[in-house]
Amino acid sequence: APGTSPGQTVTVGATAGSITGLPAAIQNLSPAPRAGSDIIVLRFLSAEGVPATGIAAAGSNTTLTMDATRWARLTDDGVAAPTLFGIADCAHADVFAGTTTAGTVVASGVNLAGRYVVQPTGQTMVYRAESLVYYVANNPDTGEPALRRARAGGNGQYTSEELVEGIESLQFLYGLDSTETIATQTPPVGNITEQRVASSVATATGAAAANQWRRVGQVQVGVLVRSPTPAAAAAPIEANRLGVLGVTVVPPTTSDGRYRATYELSVALRNRLFGN
């Protein structure tokens, strides 16, 4: 978020900058993202898939059949009716919106029949695809800030749910591999030599920007949390002010008595560290 790079200062409760250039579906999340806090989007296929046993194209649609007894693999984590799917083998992968019944997925507007070979001859698996947004927003009923997760449906719209109350700010730093251009001949070496905020990694959409994000082999996560109710906590003196990933946190101009703390965590992206 603007104004939250290492070395900068943020005053709790003061006017903060909002992230610009977000996709409309994320910009319009409800409740709205809290200004001054970062946002991260995770896109992936579920850990477990179901073997595809049939692929039949009819016009512009494709019907995928699979073992109905294994259907529960696609509906775990509380997603009873998935609408976003992925199909993959050792050579290809596609993501598509679909409608379902137990054991069947219909991919609308997608012809997958000539691209994949079903099991047991082939190795085609069907997965639930995920696009998750983690962000901080104020609860519309209580006004309390909280960490939220928004999950995308097949229509591209996100449904938000509250995860953890009392999260005031979410911050990220991205560690870049020393290899400046990631390619087959020049893979990453796992040597993280610099850290940047997202806007300093890349904001464009071209090949050069994509390469910069391929250099990311580490993510540092920082959170600022507060007690849900006033705790008679004295505001820290300037020498003892909190910090999160290099950002100094200044208490509110008018003390609210909340107890605050910060937590930081470093995550190594192992699939990006050594030659992948």
Image (cartoon, rainbow, N blue to C red):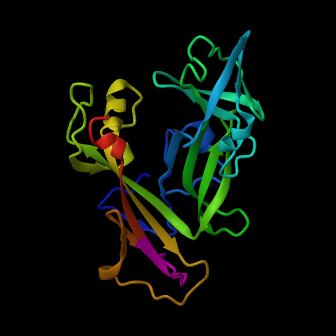
Determine if the magenta segment contains residue 88: no
Residue drawn 54% across the image and 27% down it: 88
The image quadrant that residue 237 belongs to is bottom left
Which residue is at 59% across, 40% downward?
Answer: 130
Q: Is residue 184 left or right of residue 131?
A: left
Vertical position of residue 105 compared to residue 131: above or below: above
Q: Position of residue 164 (x, y in %)?
A: 59, 66
Observer able to see residue 30: no
Magenta stretch, overall SS:
loop
As drawn, 261 above or below 101 = below
Q: Quadrant of the C terminus?
A: top left
Asked if residue 156 is positioned above or below residue 133 in the image, the reply reads above
Magenta range is: 250-262
Residue farthest right in this picture: 101
Q: Report the front residue among 99 and 170.
A: 99
Q: Taking 241 as reference, is 131 left or right?
A: right
Position of 80 relative to 64 (above/below): below
Which residue: 55% across, 87% down? 231
Q: Position of residue 40 (x, y in %)?
A: 49, 48
